[in-house]
Image (cartoon, grey):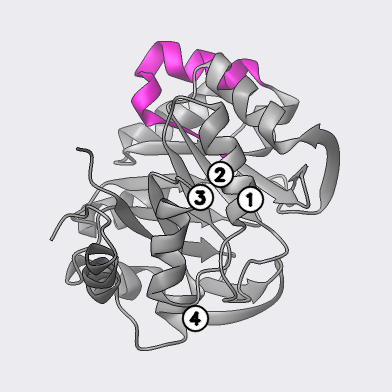
Amino acid sequence: MLKTRVMPTMLYKGYGLVKGKAFDSWRRTGGVMQTVKVYNMREVDELILLDIAATDEGREPDFALIDEVADECFMPLTVGGGIKTLEHVRGLLKVGADKIAINTAAVENPALVTETSRKFGAQCVVASIDFRGSEVFTHSGKKATGLGVVAHAKECERLGAGELLLTSVERDGCMTGYDLDITRRVSEAVHIPVIASGGAGNYDHMADAVLSGKASAVAASAIFHFTEQTPREAKERMRERGVVVRL
């Protein structure tokens, strides 16, 4: 049986790591390298690093930063933000990223998902889907697309994505629990792993995302930045609830 992964998310905004609520009211949470070193010691399964300003600012990915992070990161690293071309993907993989999270481009240039999957393998393509209600939003949750979450998830799978990162904008940073309904609907509609994101406030929320939402993995940020809770403890509680995890 595949083990459920616990994946801390780091949100990068030019000057360092930040965390907000509902993709707004950003607060600084520390430096990238220091945070990576902490997670190296906390039995993290995978790490997600998203540059949340790159697309809005028209910037390409910060390859130098990812190169530095990858050298210190002792777990699989997913990178997103500002990715528009196959050259961006190639550059990130070259400097050490293990997976590429494609968000806005999956809507505006869906061929990039297919090209990346064909060139580098579906296992490194994560379609990142931000949503409000049941509608997909791009540009860090600012731009409505008119696309339904479930339909877009199925399309991303068809295009070649190997995994989905599903983030509730409205629940992000609120620590009130994941959107279990959308998570379950997407998980039941596709045949690839779904990572639940947005809303984790305690370990039971994570277990619920797997047991009720049928997610294959859970991503979280605020719970690890603003409380004393740890990925190791999260996995211990999830195991108590019957979730298969790696310890």
Residue where numbered disc 4 is placed: 29
Q: Is residue 240 above or below residue 143?
A: below
Residue 138 seen in render:
yes
Tell me, yes or no, whether the highlighted magenta stretch contains residue 168: no
Looking at the rendering, the stretch of residues picked out in magenta corresponds to 110-128
- The reply to whether callout 2 and callout 1 are in contact (CB within 8 Å) is yes
Tag 3 or tag 4, which sits nearer the N-term?
A: 4
Marks 1, 4: nearer the viewer = 1
Residue where numbered disc 2 is placed: 184
Question: How far across and down, in percent of the image, does residue 146 sit?
Answer: 87, 35
Instruction: State the residue in front, 160 or 119.
Output: 160
User: Residue shown at 63%/42% (left/top)?
Assistant: 129
User: Residue shown at 44%/58% (left/top)?
Assistant: 219
Q: Residues within 10 Å of mark 1 (few under 14, many from 20)?
A: some
Q: As shown in the figure, which amino acid type bears the numbered disc 4?
A: Thr
Q: As shown in the figure, which amino acid type bears the numbered disc 3?
A: Gly
Question: Of helix, strand and loop, which one carries label 2?
Answer: helix
